[in-house]
Amino acid sequence: MENKIRAEFSKHFPGTMYASAGRINLIGEHTDYNGGFVFPGAIDKCIMAEVKPNGLGKVRLFSIDIDEYCEFGLNEEDAPEQQWARYIFGVCREFIKRGGKVEGFDAAFAGNVPLGAGLSSSAALESCFAFAINDMFNDNSFPKMELAKIGQSTEHNYCGVKCGIMDQFASVFGKKDQLIRLDCRSLEYEYFPMKLDGYSLVLVDSRVKHELVDSPYNKRRESCERVAKKLGLETLRDATFEDLDRIQNEISAEDYKRAHFVIGEKQRVLDVCDALTKGDLETVGQRMYQTHEGLSKEYEVSCEELDFLNDIAKECGVTGSRIMGGGFGGCTINLVKNDLHDKFIETAKVKFNEKYGHEPKVYDVILSEGAHRVDE
Ligand code: GLA
């Protein structure tokens, strides 16, 4: 009898289901916090949560994937210990700081965005809850861009990562079959249909995640900020290679390399958007290889395993390949001709396994909806 009552209770008084997606980025890496351009899209892997107000003034959460429970109040001093819960606590706090309303709620959530693969599972989690809180308690009065900023501020203020806006933006704004070019300075954006006649995008996940001791991500950002400051600019958005050469003797060799990458990457995004519009996928691919080279040698956020995957792609004749996301592990994104698809995947699996003792995981990219309410 008891089980029947419980099952009927949740059937008749369910919460509301929300979802938000992980993302890919075709090109434009480490440009977002430099006021540059990025070119991401949301994918068919998401975080999904059932959420229900509880009238208790506190949040009670259950993470299905890690089988953990957590509860917290809504004041600054109530921050939970568990990292996964801090993403949601941060979102609540950032709403409150912006004058938004957050009441107590219960939620259970799960996801299929692979963790540590560079597909932004944390942005998906933040965006899912930002969307839910906006819908449940704020009559959707916060514009979508503000939801992305709430996720970004959560990373800055509750997770210690001084990230840009790309991941949360893509997770919130994603649309089926579309990539989005975002100007991270003006926040203007444009959708581009992903027309890849005869090609596909394939993610090859190395399944390695290197320890990020000493916050190397934040250090990259600091390098860029130092160079911009030296040039009297707010960000590297307006810097040119000539500007950089002019101050070469006044900055460290390391800062020079970092800024050199960012300045080159800015143009590569524009080239790729242009080439994609013209259906010139060879140019798209070339720029992807150049980005990989830059991320590996200048920005130094690649690793042995990802360089190896990039080499395999090159050897197989794959059109474009590069490390994707923040770096230090995760996956490569590959632009592959359809008739090469199976051979490339097979070769990557065999060779990687021979060298590192495990196979990489492979995902075909399907561009999908960003944050949304699942039940209408
Ligand atoms: C991470 C960050 C983003 C962006 C990328 C690199 O995913 O969260 O803001 O900087 O790295 O492009």
Image: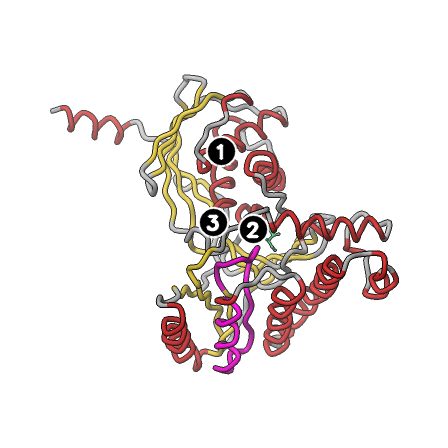
Q: Is residue 226 left or right of residue 341?
A: right
- Estimate how packed mark 1 is, as few (under 14), some (14 to 19) or many (20 or more) residues with alpha carbons within 10 Å: many
- The residue drawn where x is 73% and y is 49% is 185
Task: Name the amino acid, label 3.
Answer: Ala
The residue carrying mark 2 is 170
The residue carrying mark 3 is 21
186 vs 155, nearest the viewer: 155
Q: Earlier in the sequence, mark 2 or mark 1?
A: 1
Q: Quadrant of residue 208?
A: bottom left
Residue 336 on the magenta segment: no
**What residue range appears in magenta?**
306-331
- The residue drawn where x is 55% and y is 33% is 140
Quadrant of the image for the N terminus?
A: top left
- The residue drawn where x is 37% and y is 35% is 50
Contact check, label 1 and label 3, Cβ < 8 Å: no
The residue carrying mark 1 is 86
Task: Name the amino acid, label 2.
Answer: Ala
Query: Separation of disc 1 and disc 3 at Cα?
Result: 19 Å
Residue 36's spot in the image, x, y percent?
71, 55
